[in-house]
Image: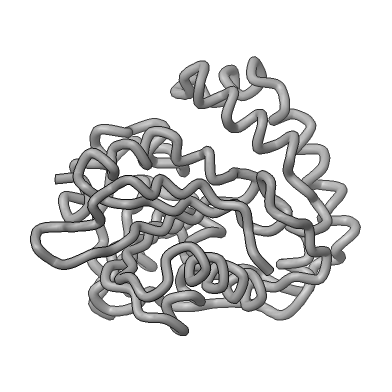
Amino acid sequence: MLLNAIDTGTGTGTRHGAGAGVVLLLHGLMGSAESWWRIAPALERTGHRVIAVDLPGHGLSPRDESCSVASVAADVIETVQALAPGVALDAIGHSYGGTVLATVASRVPIRQTVYVDTLCAFAGGEDQRRLAENYEADRRNRTDPAWLRASRPFYSETDAAVEARAAERFDPMTAASISSGADVAWDPQPGSILVRAQPSKFVTDDEAHRLAALGVDVRDIPGAAHSVWYSHFDEFCATLPEFFS
């Protein structure tokens, strides 16, 4: 299934002589491709072409009430191959998008993978309809930009507008289908980068040490929120010189 994507299509795609390439951006749960609204131009300024995808049930992508992490990964691969066939790929995935990215990376070559505050795991066994009801309650709150700014004071007006629009377009049943199947867990590949909020509600210190022992480059940003680039944009970019310098 082809997904909606924001494709800058204008960058040179070169990075320090490494050859043509694309940076794939995968948002977190209840986000959208627009969640990267400041990140994509920053990547363009350093010569990258950017493809930011709306995952199923998010943004303007189709709904799929029977999807799984595996099927979403297949949709992402199909979409990227349709938009940029045969090009070298780098990728950044946040939270749920990081779990999808780990699955994508197990199937297609990616030069550099970045996981943002994620364990690359989803617990299964949930009642889909009950979980969707919980998501719906959260979604309704998030459609109000004022509520978002009150609960996330680091949001700018544009941040709140973008995330409120993402909440309006979010489909709870599609999202809930991810947790209604089996557990999903991937370890990031050795050589990949984990950018972690410090402290993190999602990646404990023990887990970070375990991943570092496996060859994952763990980079902490003290005081950052879960959506690290929203609360600490400059620090996020500085933490990833491979992409932003």
Where is residue 183? Give x, y as percent: 66, 78
- The quadrant of the picture occupied by the C terminus is top left
Residue closer to the observer: 21 or 224: 21
**The quarter of the displayed image where residue 15 is located:** bottom left
Say whether residue 138 is left or right of residue 160: right
Q: Is residue 91 above or below residue 7?
A: below
Say whether residue 57 is left or right of residue 111: right
What's the coloring here?
A: one colour
Where is residue 197? Give x, y as percent: 37, 46
Where is residue 148? Give x, y as percent: 61, 24
Say whether residue 199 is left or right of residue 111: right
Q: Is residue 3 above or below residue 47?
A: below
| Residue 99 is at least partly visible in this image | no
Total marks in image? 0
- Furthest-bottom residue in this view: 107
Kindly identify the residue that appears in the image at 59 percent across and 23 percent down: 161
**The quarter of the displayed image where residue 70 is located:** bottom right
Residue closer to the observer: 209 or 130: 130
Q: Is residue 53 above or below residue 72?
A: above
- Furthest-right residue in this view: 129
Say whether residue 64 is left or right of residue 243: right
Kindly identify the residue that appears in the image at 33 percent across and 36 percent down: 41
- The quadrant of the picture occupied by the N terminus is bottom right
Kindly identify the residue that appears in the image at 83 percent across and 56 percent down: 173
| Residue 177 is at least partly visible in this image | yes
- Furthest-left residue in this view: 17
Residue closer to the observer: 51 or 103: 51
Where is residue 53? Give x, y as percent: 54, 54
Kindly identify the residue that appears in the image at 38 percent across and 51 percent down: 50
